[in-house]
Amino acid sequence: MPKSRSAGTASVALVLLLILGSITSPPRTRAQTDPVTVAPGFEFNLFADPTRVPDFAASAFTGPVSMAFDSRGRLFVGTYSGKILIMLDADGDGRVDQIKTFATGLVQPLGLEFRANGDLYLTSNPLGGAGRIIRLRDTNGDDVADESTIIIDGLPSEADHQTNRLKFGPDGLLYVGQGSSTEAGTPDPGHPGERLYNATILRIDVDNPSISVVATGLRNPFGMAFHPENGQLFTTDIGSGELGELPDNAPFEEINWIVSGGHYGFPGCEGPPVAGDPACAGVRGPIVTFAPHLTPTSIAFYTGPQAGDSTNQMLVTLFKHIPGQGGDLQRFILTGDAATGFQTTKVLPSIIEFGLIDPNDGPIDTAIDPISGDIYVARFDPVTHRDLFEHHHFIYRIHRAGSDSLPFIGAPRPSAIKAGSSGVTISLVTRHVKPGAVVFDVSDNVPLPTRQGSSNFELVADLP
């Protein structure tokens, strides 16, 4: 590896030399009642379920609704009951075996997002109240948030829909999906109608808290993600109408490419715009449609070392399972650009299909391990069953077949060191690499033995 130095900094150039210790492949496991199938070339295991996560066993309203990885490769999970849990796989068998409570006292944290500086941002929806954007910080490094700051309060989330996902954009600003106040444009008795920030994508400067409206006409923009290369924003939109209503006039569900100033139809023109319909004048149409009621809940772009020729495919979870459709993690090839527009091609089969346990639970969020590229999907069950101890709250880990025999090594931290520095400790976040592995500072050909860091998958080494 060539070295790169300047007057002010020196790149940390390291090469893994040796992996000590054997690597075991975790057995494939599944919930006995859960007929899960994966596409050829993929494997899965049950990372977390009520038997491993006490919170998941508590009730129908304690399951996972949001996930995010931090820069150290740790999975943070938001539960419907208002906790943020850190879930760790300390022994590397693909299943959670350590759980830490990072924060409590939140309400429906439907979105989690880390800023580059390590701050955790989330949405919170107090019952009967207004939506909030909250920043959490762990200032003393004990894995418990000891600083909580409300960045934005009073978002219109006390009616039919809430303050949903949030993502930092390439511009460093925070983008938030805000649901509508009404089912289809007409308020229920005693409920408010649509207001300024309802049914929108909002943009927030978190350093100087202020809100601007990016796009309008999105009834319930739940899932959202920025494309990792072109930086464009894509969101899901959940249409009006409930499964089983008669007559069923529900519109198609959508994925939209979000353009600043764009209007996407709600209320009055959900689904593809109809030519000649005055309500559809000036409405931007979706780039993907799904059958009514399928409820697209998350978008993620496939990145990391396992993506291969599927790099940057758009992954979408469909919460509901209608016979022959939904309840799966679908994938799409995205083509085009911001100048000409975007097109999608569906890839079959879906990466994973979760089958049907009951018609009211399904996959709700997706996160990709930044080190290994493993895909994690959370399944949420908001229904109380006859058996009060039956809860279908699961997190699945999906990976390429054979990948558990491979080591994965993240970028070293710090990534650059001031020239002339001495006594610097570097950190490597890894998967399937044992303490005692040796790295080389190739600029000086110096072997650096490693030791375990703050977790079983973090190695540290001292750079002379």
Image (cartoon, grey):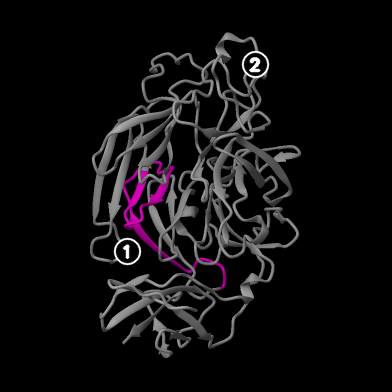
Q: Main secondary structure of the magenta part?
A: loop
Q: Position of residue 89 (x, y in %)?
A: 49, 69
**440 and 39: which one is in front?**
440
Amino acid type, label 2:
Val
Few, some or many C-alpha atoms within 10 Å of disc 2 (few <14, some 14-19, many ≥20)? some
Few, some or many C-alpha atoms within 10 Å of disc 1 (few <14, some 14-19, many ≥20)? some
Asked whether the viewer can see residue 272, the reply is: yes
Which secondary structure lies at badge 2? loop
Residue 126 lies, with reference to residue 422, above or below; the image says: above
What residue is pinned by disc 2?
A: 274
Q: In this image, 201 relative to 131: left or right?
A: right
Q: Position of residue 105 (x, y in %)?
A: 31, 47
Q: Position of residue 181 (x, y in %)?
A: 43, 23
Q: Which residues are magenta?
A: 93-122
Which secondary structure lies at badge 1? loop
Q: Is residue 138 magenta?
A: no
Residue 375 lies, with reference to residue 287, above or below; the image says: below
What residue is pinned by disc 1?
A: 143
